[in-house]
Amino acid sequence: MVEILYFAWVRERIGLPREQVETNAATVADLVEELRAREERYAAAFADLSALRVALDQDLADFDASLDGVREVAFFPPMTGG
């Protein structure tokens, strides 16, 4: 079981701030594919991975990162400075 957090427009498209997901995904990319297959709102949120960042247990990671032992996955748009 992994907790997934959604921020900014990702949360708006999916309609949830967080959820618990049972997954057999080995990597973040595998998890994204599972989520995309759920329904259209997930497909819309994950349509362009270049517009997303991911953190695993609050550490920035790549989409090919392993989910082994991970308890929390957060998806969010890139941060902008200012």
Image (spheres, helix red, strand yellow):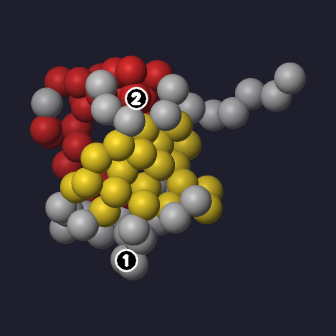
Which tag, 2 or 1, sits closer to the chain's start?
A: 2
Kindly tell me whether residue 33 is visible in this rendering: no
Q: Secondary structure at mark 1?
A: loop
Q: Nearer the viewer, mark 2 or mark 1?
A: 2
| Quadrant of the image containing the C terminus | top right
User: Horizontal placement of 72 versus 30: left or right?
Assistant: right
Task: Residue 68: give its label.
Answer: 1
Foreground residue, 15 or 48? Answer: 15
Q: Residues within 10 Å of mark 1 (few under 14, many from 20)?
A: few
Amino acid on which disc 2 is placed: Arg
Residue 14 picture location, percent across and down? 30, 27
Q: Is residue 74 left or right of residue 46?
A: right
Question: Residue placed at 40% from the left, 29% from the top?
Answer: 11
Q: Give the answer, above or below, for where 72 lies relative to 48.
A: below
Q: State which quadrant residue 6 falls in.
A: top left
In percent of the image, x 42 and y 61: which residue is there? Answer: 72
Up/down of 47 relative to 4, above or below:
above
Question: Residue at the left extreme?
Answer: 38
Which residue corresponds to mark 2?
Answer: 11
Residue closest to the far right: 82
**The N terminus: image quadrant:** bottom left
Residue occupying the point 47% across, 43% down: 75
- Give x and y (percent) for residue 67: 38, 69
Q: Residue at x 30, y 69 (%)?
A: 26
Calculate the distance from the C-alpha at mark 2 to the C-alpha at mark 1: 24 Å
Q: Is residue 34 above or below residue 7?
A: below
